[in-house]
Image: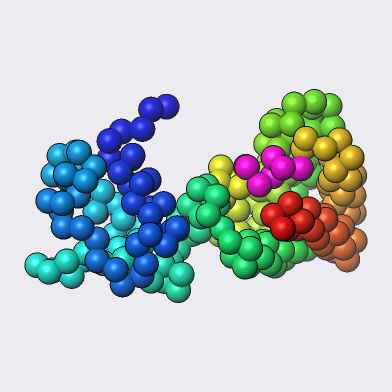
Amino acid sequence: MKQSLTEQVIEKLKIAILSGEYAPGDRLPTLRDMTELYDVSRSVINAVVVDLETTGYIKIVPTKWIEVADWKTEGNLSILSDLVRFGLLNNKQLEDLLQARRFLELECVKKACNNATREDIGRLFALLIEEETEDDPKMRSRYDLQFHYSICKMSGNMVYGIIMKAFENSAFPLIALFYNDPEVYGIVLERHQRIAQAIKEHNEIEAETQMRLLLEHGETILLQRRS
């Protein structure tokens, strides 16, 4: 879908801020200057400013200027998702993200062992059948994301599911790195099956062990490919 002018300018400014072209504390051009810089109307720039302030990218000093917010310490999930989407995560940020994901998913899989219903488990195994028979790497990536999201929902904690869902689209390029390699895919699928079986048997220790092995395997590959 084609982006609107507002969306195009928002994306350009987000990338400029996240890449360091505009550092925290820097002043952005005036509203008038931005209309000329991006060749858009004042109404477009007004909408851009509202969006960037709402998502934590900028601060407005009334009647004075607009400055870049300290998004590294005051940022939210939206900014983290944008870092992934634009491919601007540095190695330290990627390690932080992977560590946070590990913490979240290990907690979710343990809770899923106690809270998953028979219907939840049935849907999880049905998803694994579709995943196993899929040949398209992109679809395999989608099934992988759906598998992890399903476990977060099965934890019984609504917030865990929302957090995982927030990264679904932006995390797709990272997940897709795995699925062009048949050997890697085989390892991932086997771990998925073991995790699902452990949840079915209400075996927290086994579920946590298999999830940890799965995530550590993925982390190793991602970090190696960035080095």
Residue 1, compared with residue 203, is above or below; it is above
* Residue 85 located within the stretch drawn in magenta: no
The magenta span reads 172-178
**Toward which corner of the image does residue 223 lie, by quadrant?**
bottom right
**Toward which corner of the image does residue 134 lie, by quadrant?**
top right
Report whether residue 47 is seen: no
Taking the spot 65% from the left edge, 51% from the top edge, the residue there is: 153
**In screen coordinates, is 17 left or right of 203?**
left
**Toward which corner of the image does residue 113 lie, by quadrant?**
bottom right
Looking at the rendering, in which quadrant would you find the C terminus?
Answer: bottom right
**In screen coordinates, is 88 left or right of 1?**
right
Q: Main secondary structure of the magenta part?
A: helix
Taking the spot 79% from the left edge, 58% from the top edge, the residue there is: 220
Report whether residue 21 is seen: yes
Taking the spot 89% from the left edge, 45% from the top edge, the residue there is: 187
Q: Residue 163: horizontal and vertical position, in percent?
A: 56, 56
Q: Residue 33: horizontal and vertical position, in percent?
A: 15, 51
Q: Nearer the viewer, residue 128 or 15?
A: 15
Taking the spot 36% from the left edge, 32% from the top edge, the residue there is: 3
Looking at the rendering, in which quadrant would you find the N terminus?
Answer: top left
**In screen coordinates, is 91 left or right of 16?**
right
**In screen coordinates, is 167 left or right of 104?**
left
Q: Nearer the viewer, residue 133 or 96?
A: 96
Q: Residue 18: horizontal and vertical position, in percent?
A: 43, 58
